[in-house]
Amino acid sequence: MDRVVDIGFAVLLIVCGIRYFSRHPLEGEGSAALVLAIGTGVSYAIAVIGRRSPQRDPRTAGLEAVGSRQAIGLLVSTGFWLPLAVLAPSFGWCGFALFFAVHRVIRGRLAIVISTAIVVAVSTGLLIMSKGDDLGLVLGPFFGGLVLTYAYTALDRALEAQRTLNAQLVETREQLARSERDAGALAERERVASELHDTVVQRTATALLMLESDDLRGGEQSAVVGEARDALREGLVQTRQLLHGLADPREHDVPLAAALESQARAAGAEFVMVGDERTIPDAISHALTRVVQEALLNSRKHAQATWSRVTLTFFDAEVGVDVADDGIGFTAREADSATIDSESGGFGIRAMTWRIENLDGALTIESYPDEGTIVSAIVPDAAHDGGTP
């Protein structure tokens, strides 16, 4: 439709120019008409060449894309054409195409004002040409233009209402999809929790009960058996906490600082917070909590540390934790997570690395023999806009 309007305007401008200048000399009013016609055509061409289809926003009224080449060009073209239509009524026919072209970038009251100006210019030119002897020639285009302006305005409002409704429908569909995903995730959480409870928790509880029953019979037990019993008891408690979180994750709305401080206190470690505390997304909070938990466990069981400290730091757009101890440390070769895990019989450091890298973060371990270990994890916090901590 836009191309038809643009081509129609060019054709009408040429035809009207041929008609006018075939009857009027290029002097006086003819020279002024030529200048105005050239200005109208050139500014219109500048507006439409290389033009992209406008993206209309139903929330805006008035000039869309204020300052754009198309908007300015069409307004300048209209400015040239208005006096041209009065001076040379032959160019009044261009008003039809110009009307639709201008309405591509004009909305609201400004559109009504410019449309009225176009109608008045055509009627004034015809009034001057007929010297007031043919009111039908004047009033016909006048009222016809007013009706066209009203119809186009009503149509544009209906289209904007339709666009608004479409946007609301799309948003509602997205909300429904999110609700379905959340419902599916909750159902899967409950299924996994049920499966873990019926398998891992029950078997762990049975093993722990057997060890404790043997202890009650007064049998001699090695330190390894006692450590295994403590590990089973701790694992059972953590698994039940995990099941509780899977069944109803909304109940675990504990700030990250409070969770880490509680972990540090339980492990006999110091806790330090740097920066202004803020709300951290659940995924980041969970990953950092698990990293600190694993690092404190390694410090207590493997590093033979007598002192440890947990540091939580809120950066501008990141959040990080450091767990430092004065344990036995390890060499650079041993610093490889696969080596440590294979020697300790577990996969704690690999799990920590996976958790942090899965959030586009970084996990580093600094350690030297007999000089302690520092486990550092830093994760970007996309939910925070940034600011001085």
Image (tube, rainbow, N blue to C red):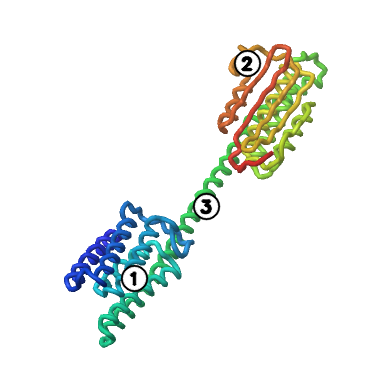
Q: Give the residue number, with chain letter if any, for mark 2.
A: 335
**Towards the viewer: 309 or 189:** 309
Residue at 38% in and 63% down = 75
Q: Would you say the residues marked 2 and 3 are in contact, meaning their CB atoms lie under 8 Å apart? A: no
Q: Quadrant of the N terminus?
A: bottom left
Is residue 90 placed above or below 235 in the rendered structure? below
Mark 1 or mark 2: name the one nearer the start of the chain.
1
**Towards the viewer: 317 or 46:** 46
Q: Give the residue number, with chain letter if any, for mark 3.
A: 175
x and y percentages locating residue 100 in the rendered image: 33, 66
Residue at 41% in and 69% down = 111
Amino acid beneath label 2 = Ala
Secondary structure at badge 3 equals helix
Residue at 70% in and 37% down = 256
Quarter where residue 155 is shown: bottom left
Q: CA distance from mark 3 to mark 1?
A: 50 Å
Q: Residue furthest bottom?
A: 133
Secondary structure at badge 1 equals helix
x and y percentages locating residue 144 in the rendered image: 32, 78
x and y percentages locating residue 86 in the rendered image: 31, 75
Secondary structure at badge 2 equals loop
